[in-house]
Image (cartoon, helix red, strand yellow):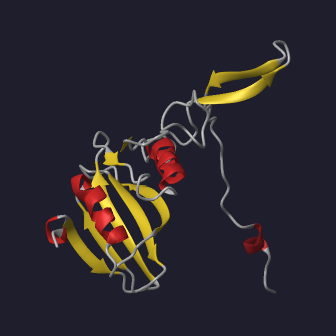
Amino acid sequence: MLMPQWVDSVSICPRTQEAECVVHPSALLFFMQVLHKTTTLQFKVLVDVTAVDYPSRAKRFDVVYHLLSVQYNTRLRVKTMVDELTPVHSLTSLYPSANWFEREVWDMFGICFLHHPDLRRILTDYGFQGHPLRKDFPLSGYVEFRYDDSKKRVVAEPVELSQEFRYFDFASPWELISKG
C-alpha cells in the first residue's frame, strides 16, 4: 500500500485511545479513498469536518476530519495543515455529508475546498466580510446593525468602540466587617 508516503505522522490520543493521522494536503483525497474503500478499514462515515487556527504557524490552519468505521467500531481523526492560500480537495464525492461541513469551514475560516459543488456561505450573510473564527478577526466585527426610526429600516454602520475612563474599586465590602 502507498499510504506511508502520504502520512506525515500517526499518533494515539492517550485519553481516548483514538488514532490520529496527519496527511499532506495534496494526498488527502487519495488517503481518504483508501480509508473508505479498503475492506479491512471501512471508514464509511464522515462524522465531522472542522478547522483550528494557529496564526503563529506558517501553515496556520489544521483541517480536521473525524471518521467512523461502523463495521469495526473504530474512530479516526485525520488532519491536514494548510495556509490561507492552499486549497483542500473536497470530499463531497466520497462522503456526501462533507457538503455542509466544508461550507461551514469555508464560511468560518475561509479555507477553500477544490471541486466543491456549492461552496458558499452557510452561517453568515452573503455580504458578510471576513471569516469569524479566524484568530485575527476583530472580536466586535466590522459593522453593527440597528433600526433607524427616521429611515424606517435596519441600517449597518461601522463599529465604534468608545471606552471612557472608568475607575474600578476592587476592595471587597465584606472585608470591612469586623469579626468581633
**Is 32 drawn above or below residue 25 in the view shown?**
below
Q: Position of residue 93 (x, y in %)?
A: 41, 52
Could you tell me which residue is drawn at 40 percent across and 54 percent down? 91
Total marks in image? 0
Q: Is residue 40 left or right of residue 172?
A: left
Instruction: Using the rendered view, name the quadrant where residue 41 is placed.
Output: bottom left
Q: In this view, does 34 lie to the left or right of 1?
A: right
Residue drawn at the location 29% of the way across and 68% of the way down: 34
Outermost residue to the top: 150
Q: Left or right: where does residue 38 sit relative to residue 166?
A: left
**Picture quarter containing residue 112?**
top left
Q: Quadrant of residue 40?
A: bottom left
* Residue 31 screen position, x and y as percent: 27, 64
Is 158 above or below relative to 130? above
Residue drawn 48% across the image and 34% down it: 130
Q: Where is residue 163 in the image (x, y as percent from the top left)?
A: 61, 35
Residue at image position (70%, 28%) is 145
Which corner quadrant holds the N terminus? bottom left
Q: In which quarter of the image is the C terminus?
A: bottom right
Q: Can you say whether 148 is above or below 97 in the image?
A: above
Q: Position of residue 173 (x, y in %)?
A: 76, 67
